[in-house]
Amino acid sequence: MRRERGLFVTFEGPEGAGKTTQVELLRQALAGRHPVVVREPGGTPLGEHIRELLLHSDMEIGGEAEALLFMAARAELVARLITPALVAGRVVIADRYHDSTLAYQGGARGVATGWPESFPRPDRTFLLDVPPEVGLERQRRAGRPVDRLESEGLDFHQAVMDAYRRLARAEPGRFVTIDATRPPKEIHRAVMTSLAACLPEEISRQQPRTG
Ligand code: Z5A
């Protein structure tokens, strides 16, 4: 596979963990680099159709078909946006990526899943670790409509969180797990500290100046 030159950062976690909040804070911090920001599923015409089908239709979809549909949306996003951006040396920030399929369809639904060769591996994956009931309560308070996956029981969401923790333990060089019950600004600081080696200019700009 072609070697990408950009920086690929992904955010993962259960519902209401604060991924979208952190993606936006990182996007603002890296505004000077014009990062490419994507969210899954979606981001392409096919991906948006698949999103509707998977999250907002009442059609019965088996676990394996569900996994393949998420991956079809991802294949399109990778081919059209992620790989071209990385090859061009851009920073790509993703709100969910293939680890979501490994945790939801693999861990919670028990579908056998692997990592397709054509999907670039993130340089860094932030796992926002929050008890599922806390995340679901945040969503409820925010008045978000409940989608097909979210309406699964607490056992399902606990299995997702457990699967994420196993994925993080298996790849400690890529995953950074952050306690997502902390305030958003503290989480953002932990994200920036972890990215310090890759983004020295942005990090030094965030340090308070003395003298
Ligand atoms: N899914 C899958 O099964 N397989 C796959 O391969 C993929 C996805 C890619 C996508 O839903 C669904 O698809 C999802 C997984 C499944 N399942 N469900 N349900 P989505 O894209 O619509 O939503 P989401 O990805 O689950 O994210 P979210 O629900 O929007 O939550 P979030 O991005 O993690 O959180 P947030 O929007 O930043 O914050 C939620 C609320 O909490 C909001 O009111 C914030 O102000 C508040 N918040 C944020 N951070 C904090 C902290 N630190 N403290 C307190 N409150 C906070």
Image (spheres, rainbow, N blue to C red):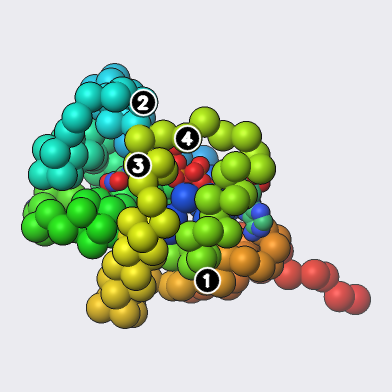
Discs 1/4, front: 4
Query: What is the x, y in percent for residue 113?
Result: 12, 56
Q: Which residue is mark 4?
A: 146
**SS of the residue under disc 4:** loop
Picture layout, residue 152 above or below residue 102: above
Q: Is mark 3 within 8 Å of ligand 1?
A: yes
Q: Which residue is mark 1?
A: 178
For the N terminus, the image quarter is bottom left
Q: Which residue is mark 2?
A: 56
- Between marks 1 and 4, how big is the CA–CA gap? 25 Å
Relative depth, front residue between 76 and 112: 112
Q: Which residue is mark 3?
A: 149
Query: What is the x, y in percent for residue 25?
Result: 62, 50
Tag 3: amino acid: Leu
Mark 4 crowdedness (10 Å alpha carbons): few <14, some 14-19, many ≥20: some
- Between marks 1 and 3, how big is the CA–CA gap? 23 Å
N-terminal label among 4 and 2: 2
Query: What is the x, y in percent for residue 83?
Result: 24, 43
**Residue at position x 29%, y 24% from top?**
58
